[in-house]
Image (cartoon, helix red, strand yellow):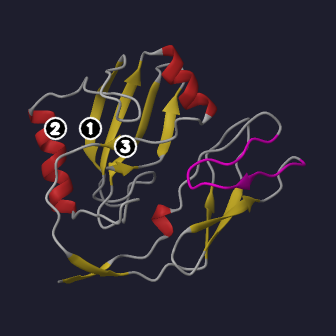
Amino acid sequence: MKKTTLKKFDEELQIVWAEVYAPNVLDSQGDFASAVSIRKAAYNFMERMRLDQVDHSHDNELVDAIVVESFIARKGDPEFIEGAWVVGMHVRNATIWNSIKSGEINGFSMEAALVRTPTKVVMDIPEYLNGRTDYVADHEHSFSVKFDASGNLVGGETDTVDGHFHTITRGTVTETALGHSHRFSYIEGLPELQRHES
């Protein structure tokens, strides 16, 4: 299972876009996949036309949502990680859509039957990573997040814009300030994995 960050959404069309899986990025279970494996999974998904197989929190109860776009991010893509499988999902369920707009739902999580291959991974995670939030309420912020010695997100905050800032306690959305929050991603700033087959 891999959870990713929603990168952008269109309120009028009720579509959200995010990477389903990015190559060589560790997920919450310490797993990762190559760009080749990700491309095969993306193509298999489309070939089997599983576009409406969408649930919430892996509860296996389908919601009224459907994948309307699917692609592999190309080199130089300004929004998505090169080699990542990206989907655009049209969310017709009003409750789910409102949870996306509020930031309560802030990513896709893929469920699949996979084969694990033992691999030793070496990754130097910097103590701090910086970036920019998405554009909400007519502004965006610069942000900085801190990691502990084990590579876990400790927290962070944004800069001050229009007299306010946001604290960060999790890795996809800021805390609310002045009635709004901002989505963000720091994955792009992480170094490439160095893999050593066990």
Q: Does the magenta stretch include residue 176?
A: yes
Q: Which amino acid does label 3 sit on?
A: Ser
Are circles 2 and 3 on residues that touch, CB within 8 Å?
no
Q: How crowded is mark 3: few (under 14 residues within 10 Å), some or many (20 or more)?
A: some
Q: What element carries label 2?
A: helix
Q: Is mark 3 on a helix, strand or loop?
A: strand
Q: Residue placed farthest to the front in the image? A: 59
Q: In which quarter of the image is the C terminus?
A: bottom left
Tag of residue 45: 2
- Number of numbered discs visible in the structure rendering: 3
Q: Which amino acid does label 2 sit on?
A: Phe
Q: Name the residue under label 1.
A: 70
Q: Which of marks 2 and 1 is nearer the N terminus?
A: 2
- Could you tell me residue 183's position as x and y percent? 60, 45
Range covered by the magenta-colored residues: 163-177
Q: Is residue 12 magenta?
A: no
Q: Which residue is drawn at 86% across and 48% down?
A: 164
Q: What residue type is labelled 1?
A: Ser
- Could you tell me residue 192's position as x and y percent? 36, 76
Per the model, the C-alpha gap separating discs 2 and 1 is 9 Å
Tag of residue 109: 3
- Please give left or right for residue 88 compared with residue 187 in the image: left
In the rendered view, tell whether residue 98 sits above or below residue 118: above
What predominant SS class does the magenta segment belong to? loop
Q: Which residue is drawn at 26% across and 37% down?
A: 70
